[in-house]
Image (cartoon, rainbow, N blue to C red):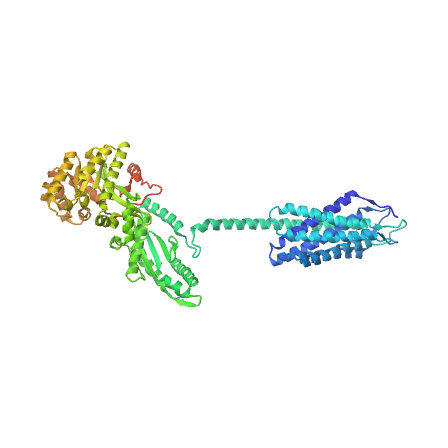
């Protein structure tokens, strides 16, 4: 037999080629399910061609590693035929195995037979391409073993190609390991088949064909070009996929970030995002003293649409109504969906002209017929508007007023719009549930005292504060006394709530004293029921002693109608307060009996002129004369005079000129909770208006009520 030797470097190169071809084939298989149909076809063919050429290249590099004592040539067409068999078998096998969600035994067996038959055929056709004058002597056992190895290697390779296509975690390492196994199996089959071949000693090479040098150049160039191109394409594809995945993730993150701020059905901003925009608009309006509007919109009888045609039609109607409303809005307006069929509209720089042109047009657009899911239907809209600062200075107030206006429109027949008026929300709730909540409010610590500053006219400084009762309802927010005070008086709850207010006011005054404001006074309203309370004097005196307060710093305000109801007892009680050093003030003077001569009978030390006189003083000369007379008489009786309800600088100037001692009104400040008083002091000493973060709602002029609790 002919003595044959082996080149270990070429053997190693053949293994490397098999490994690279296997890895590229596995990588191509993994891209099939991630690609479109056309791209998937490319990766099927590319994976099969790469694997086939890799096996073929490995085979001929292995043959070149076999050193014979003569120059060997290879038959051109048989060499090309072996290449075609390898490529065809690999491509068919890959296309049978990789598609589909599962790999059946039949598909695996069929593809294994095709690939193994192709590998065996490629190997032995390639061996037959050796141009020798004498045939090759084959060891049948080794040939059979090589066939078995080819079948096992093909089955393992195809199984791994299928199962590694969906691996995501550690996929790169798994494919490298699988490619190493596949390369080892291919080399084992090849070199087993090579070892089955023996050559005669006298064998000679036939003339013609491809020389070893030519074959090595051809195989090298073909293999390097193909594998290089496939690796480059794979890297480009992976980079492109990574970039697209990054873009998708970025878009998804943006959508997730925006999702909490937008309504999923209509695409409008939702309640939370709208509140942020409203807060920004409110701050801007405060700083620049601008007006803006807030509109509540509600689709009339929307429930009937859902009940009659179903929720799908209802959703379509909401989307179409949204589109029609937004089409009529300007860029600076913002529409939000509150939920269901309720919407809220922010109208910056709103005025009467804007509302009169915008809202009728919106209502008309919404009234036009709709054709939805094969159904023809119509709907109407009810809208209520509140304006800053006329109807409130907080979002809570503006929302309540806009909702009240909208409910008024619905009560009046729907299909219209209205701007809020005070009479729309003056009715006090009397439902049993409301009364039950009111009876538990004191125990649940839901009542609060808010404070409105009283200004010293000459010194232009804070003289003290008037306490005003508020109910922080868990659902409706801060409620003003006009909504619950009548119920407190009717149920008798005014007594315990009033006693709580006396102690809370003294406790707050003590706190301010510890903070260094020992000159401040505190005015506290007494309701008619409290004033008639037999032990009211003892309750007030006990609170002052408990908090170690000077009685002169507490001012008890009583309306003239209350004081004159039981004149004898009133005189006795007022004298007791005076002897103790507590100041008594006649509140809302001019709205009750209006008898100036009665002031000489009542031992009061302070008089508060009702704001109704102040507001009309500039327009009505008689009211101005009356205010001047009241101030003169009070001065004669050595009573201090407080003017409340001051809203303009002109009113302030006139009242100061007339001789009022103290001034109170929205010109100086609206009622504030105790924690906001430091901001008031900072604002007083600043040229700019200071807006505290998380500003607590304050009340509007339209619904301001005295605390008679």
Q: Is residue 414 left or right of residue 627?
A: right
Percent of width and height locating residue 505: 25, 38
Quarter occupied by residue 375: bottom left
Q: Is residue 221 left or right of residue 578?
A: right
Quarter occupied by residue 382: bottom left
Percent of width and height locating residue 702: 25, 50
x 43%, y 52%: residue: 262
Examine the rendering and report whether any part of residue 690 can be seen: yes
User: Which residue in the rendered view is the most extreme toward the right?
Assistant: 202
410 vs 39, nearest the viewer: 410
Q: Is residue 365 above or below residue 555?
A: below
x 48%, y 50%: residue: 256
Percent of width and height locating residue 4: 85, 46
Q: Is residue 333 left or right of residue 429?
A: right
Examine the rendering and report whether any part of residue 516 can be seen: no
112 vs 593, nearest the viewer: 112
Percent of width and height locating residue 468: 24, 43
Q: How many numbered discs, if any?
A: 0
């Amino acid at each position: 037999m002919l003595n044959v030797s082996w080149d270990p470097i070429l053997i190693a190169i053949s293994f490397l080629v098999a490994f690279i071809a296997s890895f590229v084939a596995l990588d191509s298989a993994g891209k099939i399910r991630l690609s479109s149909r056309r791209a998937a076809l490319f990766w099927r063919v590319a994976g099969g061609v790469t694997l086939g050429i890799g096996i073929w290249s490995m085979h001929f590099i292995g043959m070149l590693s076999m050193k014979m004592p003569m120059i060997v040539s290879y038959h051109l067409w048989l060499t090309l035929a072996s290449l075609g068999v390898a490529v065809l078998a690999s491509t068919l096998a890959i296309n049978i195995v990789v598609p589909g969600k599962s790999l059946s035994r039949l598909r695996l067996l069929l593809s294994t037979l095709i690939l193994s038959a192709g590998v065996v055929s490629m190997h032995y056709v390639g061996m037959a391409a050796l141009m020798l004058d004498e045939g090759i002597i084959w060891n049948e056992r080794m040939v059979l073993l090589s066939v078995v190895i080819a079948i096992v290697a093909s089955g393992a390779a195809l199984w791994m190609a299928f199962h590694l296509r969906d691996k995501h975690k550690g996929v790169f390492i798994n494919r490298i390991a699988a490619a190493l196994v596949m390369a080892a199996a291919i080399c084992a089959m090849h070199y087993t088949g090579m070892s089955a071949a023996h050559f005669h000693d006298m064998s000679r090479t036939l003339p013609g064909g491809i020389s070893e040098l030519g074959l090595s150049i051809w195989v090298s160039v073909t293999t390097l070009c193909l594998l290089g191109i496939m690796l480059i394409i794979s890297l480009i594809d992976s980079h492109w996929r990574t970039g697209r995945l990054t873009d998708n993730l970025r878009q998804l993150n943006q959508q997730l970030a925006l999702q909490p701020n937008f309504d999923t059905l209509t695409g409008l901003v939702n309640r939370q995002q709208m509140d942020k925009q409203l807060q920004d608009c409110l701050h801007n309006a405060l700083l620049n003293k601008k007006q803006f509007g807030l509109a509540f919109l509600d689709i009339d009888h929307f429930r009937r649409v859902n009940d009659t045609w179903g929720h799908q039609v209802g959703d379509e109607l909401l989307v179409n109504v949204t589109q029609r409303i937004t089409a009529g809005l300007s860029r600076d307006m913002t529409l939000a969906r509150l939920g269901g069929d309720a919407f809220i509209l922010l109208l910056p720089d709103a005025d009467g002209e804007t509302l009169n042109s915008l809202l009728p047009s919106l209502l008309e657009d919404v009234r036009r017929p709709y054709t939805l899911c094969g159904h023809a239907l119509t709907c109407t809209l009810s809208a209520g508007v509140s304006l800053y600062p006329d109807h409130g200075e907080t979002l809570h107030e503006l929302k309540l007023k806009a909702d009240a206006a909208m409910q008024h429109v619905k009560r009046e027949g729907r299909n219209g719009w209205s701007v809020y008026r005070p009479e729309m929300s003056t009715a006090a709730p009397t439902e049993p549930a409301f009364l039950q909540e009111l009876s538990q409010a004191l125990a649940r610590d839901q009542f609060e005292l808010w404070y409105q500053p009283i200004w010293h006219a000459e010194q232009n400084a804070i003289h003290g504060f008037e306490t005003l009762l508020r109910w922080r309802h868990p659902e409706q927010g801060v409620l003003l006394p006009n909504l619950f005070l009548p119920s407190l008086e009717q149920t008798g709850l005014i007594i315990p709530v009033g006693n709580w207010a006396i102690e809370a006011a003294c406790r707050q005054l003590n706190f301010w004293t510890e903070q260094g404001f020992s000159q401040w006074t505190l005015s506290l309203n007494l309701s008619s029921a409290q004033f008639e309370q037999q032990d009211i004097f003892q309750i007030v005196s006990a609170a002052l002693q408990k908090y170690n307060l000077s009685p002169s710093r507490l001012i008890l305000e009583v309306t003239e109608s209350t004081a004159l109801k039981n004149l004898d007892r009133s005189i006795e009680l007022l004298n007791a307060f005076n002897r103790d050093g507590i100041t008594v003030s006649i509140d809302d003077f001019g709205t009750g009996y209006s008898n100036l001569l009665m002031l000489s009978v009542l031992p009061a030390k302070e008089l508060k002129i009702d704001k109704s006189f102040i507001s009309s003083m500039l327009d009505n000369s008689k009211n101005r004369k009356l205010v001047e007379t009241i101030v003169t008489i009070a001065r004669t009786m050595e009573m201090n005079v407080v003017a409340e309800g001051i809203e303009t600088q002109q009113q302030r100037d006139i009242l100061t000129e007339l001789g009022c001692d103290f001034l109170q009104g929205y010109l100086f400040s609206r009622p504030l909770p105790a924690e906001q008083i430091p901001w008031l002091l900072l604002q007083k000493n600043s040229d700019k208006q200071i807006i505290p973060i998380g500003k607590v709602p304050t009340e509007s002029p339209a619904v301001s009520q005295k605390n008679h609790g």
